[in-house]
Image (cartoon, rainbow, N blue to C red):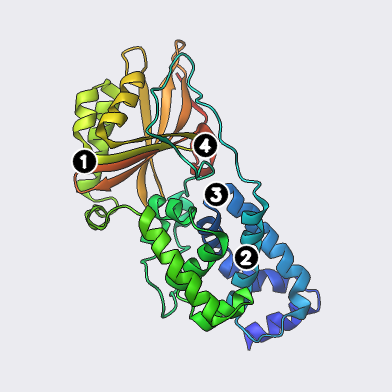
Amino acid sequence: MATADLVTRARAGDGDAFRELTEPHRRELHVHCYRMLGSFQDAEDALQDTLLSAWQSVGAFEGRSSVRTWLYRIATNRCLDALRSASRRPAVPWDVPDVEPPEPTRLGEVVWLEPYPDAVLDGALGTQPGPAVRYEQTEAMSLAFVAALQALPPRQLAVLVLRDVLGYRAREVADLLDTTVESVTSALKRARAGLQRHRAPAEDRDRVPAPGSPAEQEVVAKFVRAYAAGDLEALLAMLTDDVRLAMPPIPLEYHGRTDVGRFYATILSPAFTYEFVPTRANGQPALGTYLRGPNGLRHGIGLVVLTLAGDRISAITRFDSGVLPSFGLPRSLPA
């Protein structure tokens, strides 16, 4: 009854009633847009477009679905519009002066990928998923999972997220996307196959230490000690054989311990003094990375997100300093 009253008032132009209707879903919609788009900032833009579109069309809302489902319909279509516009963040060149990186293993394609702060994520995954859910909500926020989603065609991506992550039934997804159940079923089959090709091996996913556990903390502490000391041998000893290093929006990628070692050999030097501030991104340990300058000022050079497999590191993703403010981290630390 309370919701029906709010809908009636919102349809009559009551902005306070509209905000009361939509605010409980705001954070989970932001997460949904992030999964679809792979970018924290793009998700924010899509969320604002969603709420604006919902406000403009609330007069036509007839209550045949829940307010939540109605908002997911709008958000999904705003994200599909963004994916089809091809106006994604472009690749940028290597940005560390006086350092020439080695030849990469390959050039990455998902250069628009951004990390999602755990501080923002907290409480946004609390909604009970539907009966068709296939992935744990925390797993579906991991950096590797979100990156793998970005390799899917837009319609397949939308279907997989709605069906396997949020647990909507096939008929509900067909209604959300204005298509048929047969089309949804076909798209989901292709999306699952495509996602599997880009995901980390199941054995690595099964060995991830619990967030904040002593095992996780020990691996992160060892990584920090090795990096700060410029100890390449100790750093490489922590990596899995098939470790991957990526650095969006720079497209360089290094695969395997040998190639990753070639990269770190160029930036781990006594000439560089690194310091780290711990944080969390996508449910994973992350480190704000700072480089000490000649005047003692420590300049932020990026954020490193670690993917763990047991007591080893299976992936390292380095983001530029532009993401630091989203994590509440300063651009520089005082001398």
Q: Look at the numbered disc 2 and give the secondary structure of its residue.
A: helix
> Compared to 81, does 305 lie above or below?
above
Name the image quarter holding residue 21: bottom right
Say which residue appears at 76% left-offset and 80% top-offset. 60
Q: What amino acid type should be assigned to the residue bearing mark 2?
A: Ala
- The C terminus sits in image quarter: top left
Mark 3–mark 2 Cα distance, whole angstroms, equals 15 Å
Residue 249 badge: 4
Labelled pair 3, 1 in contact (Cβ < 8 Å): no
Q: What amino acid type should be assigned to the residue bearing mark 3?
A: Phe
Mark 1 lies on residue: 218
Mark 2 lies on residue: 75
> Compared to 271, does 96 lie above or below?
below
* For marks 3 and 1 on the same chain, the one whose residue lies earlier in the sequence: 3
Mark 3 lies on residue: 40
Residue at the far bottom: name it: 1
User: Around disc 2, counting alpha carbons within 10 Å, would you say few (fewer than 14), some (14 to 19), or many (20 or more)?
Assistant: many
Camera-nearest label, 4 or 3: 4
Mark 2–mark 4 Cα distance, whole angstroms, equals 25 Å
Q: Look at the numbered disc 3 and give the secondary structure of its residue.
A: helix
Say which residue appears at 49% left-offset and 57% top-offset. 152
